[in-house]
Amino acid sequence: MPVERGRIPELPLMPRARSVARHLHRSYPVGHQQFSRALAGVELELTISTPDHFSEDVRVNLVTTINADGAYEWLEVPFVRVDESTFACRITPGRPGLYTFRAQFSLDGWLTKLRDQVPDAWVLVDPPQIDDMRLYTMLPTVSGTVQDWTADLRRIKAMGFNAIHLLPITSLDESESPYSAHDLFDIDHSYVASDVNRDRLSQLEEFIEEAKALEMRLCFDLVLNHVGVTSNIARRAPDWIVPDESSPDGFKRARFWSDKGWQIWEDIVLINYEHPSDKIRAQIWDYMTHYALFWAKYADYTHGFVRFDNLHSSDGAYQHSLTQSLRNTYPNLGIIAEYFTDDDTLLNSVPVWGLNLLLATPWNHKFVPQLREYLRYIHRISEQIRYFMPITSHDSGSPAQEFGSIESTVPRYVAAALLGTGATGITQGVEWGDPLKTNFIGRHPKREQPDEAIFEGFIRTVNQILTDHTTFRRGNNCHFVDNDHHAIIAAFRKDSKTENGGYLVICNFDTVCEHLFEADLEPFLGDMDAVTCRDLLTGEEWSFPSARVRFVLQPCVAKVLVF
């Protein structure tokens, strides 16, 4: 039989598409990896311009899924001609999600439509609570009952926090770690009053109602990778656990990396999201998704958040399925993730999974040069990735342990809150100047609060600055003016609302020595005969004969100067 020849397809005649201008500049990035960010309810402005000029007959529309009725519907929104070289379009996203858009042109009154000759653009629209999030991490195992938590809400709000992160409150397994759950759908008996005739979740719901009444958003911690070694899942459905023949009970333990190499958590076993049985794998995925939705419902009720613990160790296929379920059920829910991976992975997964904030780790950068570079990175990537940057975390040491003294709390919190991109917070204990981190593992008596919270007033002031001045909640606007000083970080943050104005944030991280700081601010303030400024932390005012400023900074001092 002779060889059969393959079909040669017809090559269509496709003349080059006519361009409306030789060079086009778009105010937005295009392509999946260069997605942009926006906030639901906040106007998004897009521009298209040319260094030459557009002819009078050019018309431009935005073709987009933003605000469309269905997932596969498109809207057309007109661009308005600003001048002979620029078109602008303003659109206010109505709900969070991942959307796409492109420009569409016409030269003949829309008889013919010309598609923009670049890939479609993508935008991740965040829920509004992502902006200006000030998060207080509460440690339930040392904080008494939910009635005590409720009583503490007003104190936490008075410090300027608008959200509370609860470490996992599910019932504790043998090790009594919040991250080793026994029952994923109930809270631990130590968190409720035994003499109250209401079940555990009913008592928790009273706390949730009070938080909502005070406009305090709640963040529930979701632990999806593992459960306790004697948990309900391990006992009732042992086939749901990753097997390990070398382990006495046949269960594979979770691991973590430290300076000593890989270490094993003996109290937690891994959930088998890649189970070879389609039926059992579907059961696991369904059960764990119900767990996430169960706690997300409480979070969404307070316009709050969920937090993915250890996301970088999670099963990617399941994570994609879960985030879709969360977004479909609670579209206005905020998602925070502990997610440490490379930039390419972030840029590919963050928009698809709808991750609103990732945990930043400034405590890992103890020396000024490294912290400065980390802040540069936070701003450089802020067009696509947004970070939540607390001073320390519940897993880290206290500020005194991490940075050498209790007083280091001042420059470190100013840096975390006012040199980042807006989302910040503390862990319970920072306000009291605790010299050591709180041990959150184990059922402990309620910790007695000191009569005086050393840093409470300071924290309140910083949080108020963050609330009142939106410049600190923008990315890519942090211009370092410290000449790479070994102990001082100083940056000017330009105020977009004024031509010659802004903020100078100066932090002396030295715990022992004072340092002289000088900087020429003429590039930001212009050529001025005299400048005046006020410290937003203390209210002090200064005048200088020119835009060159000079300060002697005491150890562990910060200034937030408005010009």
Image: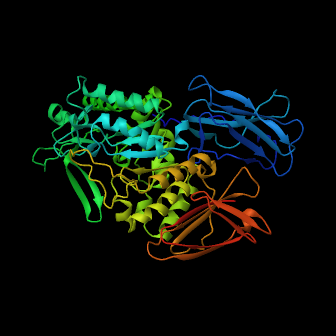
Residue 392: percent from left, percent from top? 40, 56
Camera-side residue of 458 and 74: 458
In this rendering, does residue 275 appear at all?
no
Image quadrant occupied by the C terminus: bottom right
- Position of 33 with respect to 367 (left or right) is right
Which colour scheme appears in the figure? Answer: rainbow
Q: Residue at x 81, y 28 (%)?
A: 110
Q: Is residue 98 above or below residue 538?
A: above
Residue 518 x %, y %? 64, 74
Where is residue 242 drawn, in percent x and y?
22, 42
State the image quarter where residue 91 is shown: top right
As drawn, is 154 to the left or to the right of 13? left
- Asked if residue 236 can be seen in this view, the reply is yes
Above or below, 57 against 33 in this view is: above
Q: Quadrant of residue 550?
A: bottom right
Against 522, residue 59 (above or below) is above
Residue at x 21%, y 54% (from the top left corner): 264
Of 519 and 102, the residue lying toward us:
519
